[in-house]
Image (cartoon, helix red, strand yellow):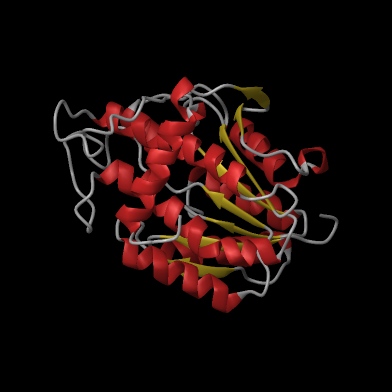
Amino acid sequence: MTHARTVLITGATDGLGRALAHRLAAGGDTVLLHGRDQGRLDATADAIRDEHGVARPATFRADLAELAQVRELAAAVRGATERLDVLVSNAGIGSGEPDGRDRRESKDGYELRFAVNYLAGFLLTQELLPLLRASAPARVVNVASLGQQEIEFDDVMLEHGYSGIRAYCQSKLAQIASTVELAERVPAAEVTFNSLHPATYMPTKMVLQEAGHSIDSLETGVEATWRLVTDPKLAGVSGRFYDRQRESQALKQAYDTRARAELYQLSLKLVGLTQG
């Protein structure tokens, strides 16, 4: 991809997403910004235009806790651009505050962390896949975590023994498993799918509010994610999980063919898609 890329970043108004948007725009790429709050989207778009002397990025408001809004987001992106080189699925909620430690449900009645961290990105990817394939070679980068927990298919919505950490870790394992599954289903020459743990406890609002301290710098996470978006050496590399910039292994379930197939079919059903 030697031409300037068009990159959609979900969760682009704060933390890693916002910093990555600045980094890509500074390098000449066109960024499409998603967020929940139009005021923060406008402030981010204005800052990117003013700081880097580029055209003001397009903004897309959607609450990923509602699948209908995810569909509207995909339709708006398809209507706004003829090509999409990269989707960075970065938006998500952590294991605790500000989204609560108690069990909550999305607008569609699904466990909130599974819905926002996993199902929204799954649906968005499915909805944008034709555009990504038409823009080949394209990439999907899923911002996941080293915090993982195997999916209990008998209680995916965690109605028993709920904790925010368990819910978060399960949603991240689902994200990684789905990344591997899509890499098996879509030729790498068309679209590659990779996930990563960008950094540990970056000083983002989500981390500071819950943990009260940071470990890695935001730049560590930006650099690792930017590499998966841009590095020519990763052309054709698909289905991998990275710990920062090092290739790593997720929990075993992510590589279990039967578990992945079960998750994929369940996900299609939960988001209202029929193709298998």
Residue 40 located left or right of residue 272: right
Residue 38, horizontal then vertical, whole percent: 41, 67
Res. 187 in view? yes
Residue 121, horizontal then vertical, whole percent: 45, 51
Image position of 147 with respect to 133: above or below: above
Residue 203 located left or right of residue 26: left
Residue 180 located left or right of residue 226: left
Image position of 4 with respect to 267: above or below: below
Image position of 36 with respect to 213: above or below: below
- Who's the residue at 76% across and 43% down the image? 236
Res. 50 in view? no
Residue 41 or residue 95, whichever sits in front? 95
Quick one: quadrant of the N terminus?
Answer: bottom right
- Who's the residue at 48% across and 55% down the image? 13
Residue 227, horizontal then vertical, whole percent: 71, 39
In the picture, residue 86 is in which quadrant? Answer: bottom right
